[in-house]
Image (cartoon, grey):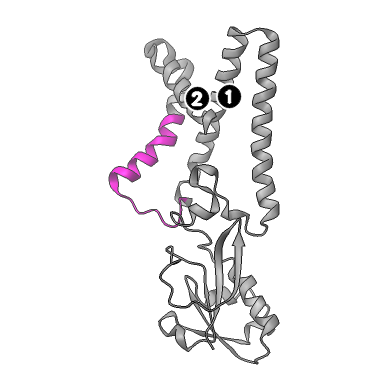
Amino acid sequence: VVLFLFGVGASIMRLFSNFRNNYLAYKQDLIVLCWFFGPLIAIILLHSIVYDGWRQLYFVYPALIYLSLVGLETLLISFSKDFSIKANLVFKWCLGSFIVLNLIGVLWFMVRNHPYQNLYFNLLAGGQENARNNFEMDYWGLTFRQGLNYILAHDNDKLIPVSFTGGSEDNILILEPKFKSRFIVISEENADDAKYVLSNYRWQQYEILPWDNEYYSIMVDGAKVMTVFKLH
């Protein structure tokens, strides 16, 4: 984020400080700035619907990376001009260490929470525990497989009525055929007729679900992302 902000500032300054002379040399900066901010501004002004996060805007990531690299280049050039060689080396070492440690932190989260590494939120979002109140977590329902397997391992009934909140019967399709046949899917409207209800807390349903008899839950860094409720 810091490098990105430096990059945005540096791109604007070197482009518009003398636009007539600098346009040809830095026109790619103008293109990338429009590439990144144009869609975001359009969505805000037009009140466009963005479904489940911002997967419709993934195409702006290369622009974000470009601007971050501009920020990194700007910092390195500034220090090389204004400070001694020794201070410049120390700065490069500190900056490199910061970037590596940040990448290690993200990698460690991915390893520790596999296969739910897609639920990562950084500190600006408040981490997983706070982000769950402002963002969708497992809206794809990937955690349902683990919940269904837990039911299969601990319930000996030949037919098991289950219902989903935030999911559907399609979540059962990932199971092997011999296991899929054991489940009877009850609609969400008639969830009380099911033996188990699985919820991924879609639409931040943490406080409004009517069941409190938790049978099994999946946690990701302190945030509850899926719960199996046993009703009968």
Provide residue 161's location: percent of width, then percent of height.
55, 87
Q: Nearer the viewer, residue 74 or 60?
A: 74
Q: Quadrant of the C terminus?
A: bottom right
Q: Residues within 10 Å of mark 1 (few under 14, many from 20)?
A: some
Provide the secondary structure element on which disc 2 rests: helix
- The dominant secondary structure in magenta is helix
Q: What residue is disc 2 on?
A: 6
Q: Residue 48 lies in magenta, yes or no?
A: yes
Q: Residue at x 44, y 29 (%)?
A: 31
The kind of residue on which mark 2 rests is Phe
State whether residue 116 is above or below residue 100. Answer: below
Q: Residue at x 53, y 63 (%)?
A: 140
Q: Which label sits on residue 72?
A: 1
Q: Residue 203 lies in magenta, yes or no?
A: no
Q: Which residue is drawn at 57% across and 55% down?
A: 119
Q: Give the range drawn in magenta.
A: 32-54
